[in-house]
Amino acid sequence: MIDKKMLDRVKELSQYRLVDERPVEEMNSYGMVLEHKKSGARIFLMSCEDDNKVFSIGFRTPPQDSTGLPHILEHSVLEGSEKFPVKDPFVELVKGSLNTFLNAMTYPDKTVYPVASCNDRDFQNLMDVYLDGVLHPSIYREPKIFLQEGWHYEMEETDSPLIINGVVYNEMKGAFSSPESVLDRYTKAVLFPDTPYRHESGGDPACIPDLTYEQFIAFHKNYYHPANSFIYLYGDMDMAEKLEWLDRAYLSQYDRTDFTLDSRIPMQEPFKEPIERETTYSVTAEEGTKGRTYLSLNTVVGTDLDPELYVAFQILEYALIDAPGAPLKQALIDAHIGQDILGGYDNGILQPCFSVIAKNAEREQKGEFLAVVKGTLRRLADQGIDRKSLLAGLNYYEFRYREADYGSAPKGLMYGLWSMDSWLYDGDPMLHLQYQKTFDFLKKAVSEGYFENLIRGYLLDNPHEAFVIVSPCTDQTAREDEALAERLKAYRDSLSEEERSEIVRKTKELKAYQEEPSSQEDLEKIPMLQRSDIEKKAEGFSYEVKEESGIPVIHSPLFTSGIGYLKVLFDFSVLPDEDIPYGALLKSVLGYVDTEHYSYSDLTSEIYLNSGGLDFSVGGSQKMGEPGNFTGTFTASVKVLYEKLDFAFEMLEEILLRSKLTDEKRLGEILDETMSRARMRLENSSHSSAAMRAASYYSPLSSFYDRTGGIGFYQFLEKITERCSKEEGYRLKLGKKLMEVAKTLFTASNMTVSYTADEEGYGRLPAALAAFKAVLPEGNGIRYPYEFKPELKNEGFRTASQVNYVACCGTFGESAYTGALKVLKVILNYEYLWVNLRVKGGAYGCMSSFGRNGETMLVSYRDPKLGETNRVYEGIPEYLRTFSIDDRDMTKYVIGAFSELDAPLNPAAKGARNLGAWLSGVTDEMIQRERDQVLNVTQEDIRALAGLLESVLNTGALCAIGNDQQIVNEQELFNEIKHLYH
């Protein structure tokens, strides 16, 4: 129940002016918009029963150039403040907080600082540290923060090479290595040439070194004033108390008259006629340039302040591009333009845009591309869009809006970011949150030609349009690196001995600053919880193992608001080793080909008209106490309302048993798209791929993961794609192979079911499952052992990336696992690795993980170094042997470990946790023992882990994905050097 008396107290606060208030029934919340009278701060409250409380303060920060000033400032303000003068209060909070979210984000026109926690005291601490950081940062007294987070020249000695380093500088070198990222950034610059969107708020690595400390300070003075702020509070809390504290501690110190800057985002004047522009991205010589061009058509679509357009164009994205068989996508595929069709509606800026992108096309196809896109859109506008597809898209998005499942991100956080899509532009922050009226309007509008008129008005007869080409350029990164090295050498050579000595001095001063710990007195100013604040009892698993018609059922009896979360699992062990990658390929094919009763486009519409979605995945679980023994599973997941459970099984029957897998044309299209998406995953998650690959050298489970979703799977896709292009009839052979694998995999004797629903929902399962089992073949019961031979390949994968991803992996054996490793993860991620790889080394990210089976991963992300990073890993055992901290710091690390252990889970996630426990054999007793070990850990326990880390390092598994030349220069680290893409 929402506390109405508390809300009345909010209205009585004299420091604030109430602007608007009303229930937000869609979020089961009550919204209030206020203004702080003295400072001019905007406030938006969402009062509800959710105990995962969220606070955020955001600022309009339109960039004035592409030096990345807003982004560097976002990093820097959390590097110390007046009240909390430690060097990195952000990291200190991560170490010792129960936060459910703690981060900061830079967007093209705003910077946002959100935090979330279920613990009241912790939540208050997070608010205090973040507010002091953004309003009173240490950047004014310590310029080295700017040098560390932004950029600086670096020279070890006067005759050393001169280089540029900095966390944001290296982060953006990584971001600029992706062709999709290059296209997105360039498109905004082309569409909005007269507004701040033409600049790169994150920072262009070529421009970042132009930024001065004086500009950096001036930007904070100009934009980080409460009158330019947007403060958001969500959840179950005393809002009146929080507002009084905000006024007393911070806002009352400011006067709105001191803020004279007009930070509003200007509108781009519409183009009088469409334009065409072109840029390039880097590929290696090994990849080649044939079939590597991106062709894109982009149009500006109204503003974010139109609630109907805001949702309608998400529906159009689904109906035109995203859905299998979507007409715009299919027309381009049928014309053989591009390997994959991407794009859609890009909102979150004042003037959103709609894009159609053909990936891996030929530059010479631009005329045909435009003709197909425009011709298809004209035909749809004149003849009508398939109503079933539009209604399916509407149902799909309405289900997502209602379910509010954002994975690990608190839903209150997402609501806050959502509100900024209108609030930032002086609109109503509840505009998009009260979505039901919009959906009701659009459902009616489907039959009234509304969507066809949108196509005419915005995608056909709209001169604010840009055709953008992004072409491959061989070894562009290498040439840019060489040109930068030459410029730096020329600059160094132009310096006097005294000037070189000055750079060397500043380099050493910065490193000394980075190595010097904050004083204990300052560290103790950071608020933290105590071990006594932690619940001693672990949250056990809440599932029951049942049997229905001879099928094992893992039932998670939870309240789910009437949604049943069904998972049907099939064990990979029925497949011989050579068929495992084909089993993984099935997850990309099933649901995307015709079946006996549906075309693949109708199939998707049918699914989304009647459910929250159906998807397939491949995963694995290590059996506790059985080293090397794991279960690989092909999982079909469906979200349905309880009364639609029969429909879920009917769709699974149709897809698993009646899919037409020998349609050669369709199979070729799916293979092209799967290759494209697999490559994008490798590019966007190179750290994960490198870690999975390194672990695959010694771990059967990681080998399985690599072969079904990592580098090994991508190599498999490359091989079968090449065979499709060279061997007559190979696609038919491939289709028959997939049919054979599906027939073996999808049998009644090979099935396990997981169902998350309350008892009412479960009541419908037995009959529905019995009917499903009856149509499945029984299976022959033959099982195959996983074929695995350990081999330390230690590969260095060369790419056109400007940075590296370095993974060192190993094992210490399952029996040695202890909860102390949860604490060690916090220590390494936010102390040892953070200081050495990020603070000193300039890598954007660093992480470690320790599995119950003993598998350990040490990984860097967007890292300018390679060999130096591996030496940091090698130094961990010695660091642990001499590990010595006081009780307060030890407690801080313990609290930080519980932030992950006690992360709140929605019903679907709890059901998945239960299933994982059953598959792996993890018990309540194990997690209670682990919790006790974490809660009672001592520094002696941490020192005792040195031997375990030595075992990890002695495993000797290393894999890196990264900069072509750096991999070659560090070839002694590897047994094999190869190109990642061919």
Image (spheres, rainbow, N blue to C red):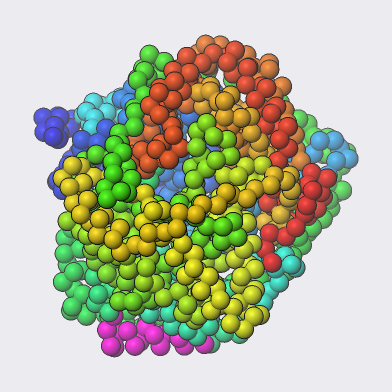
Q: Quadrant of the N terminus?
A: top left
Q: Could you tell whether 265 is left or right of 805 in the image?
A: left
In magenta, the rendered stretch is 368-385
Indicate yes or no whether the magenta region holds residue 374.
yes
The image quarter containing residue 510 is top right
**In this view, 91 is above or below 340:** above
Nearest the camera: 581 or 75? 581
**In this view, 937 is above or below 82:** above
The residue depicted at 32 percent of the width and 42 percent of the height is 554
| Percent position of residue 224, x then y | 43, 40
User: Number of labelled discs?
Assistant: 0
Magenta stretch, main secondary structure, is helix
The residue depicted at 47 percent of the width and 14 percent of the height is 936
| Percent position of residue 878, x then y | 71, 22
Indicate yes or no whether the magenta region holds residue 91.
no
**In this view, 209 is above or below 859:** below
| Percent position of residue 910, x then y | 33, 39
The image quarter containing residue 799 is bottom right
Residue 938 appears anywhere in the view: yes
The residue depicted at 30 percent of the width and 33 percent of the height is 542
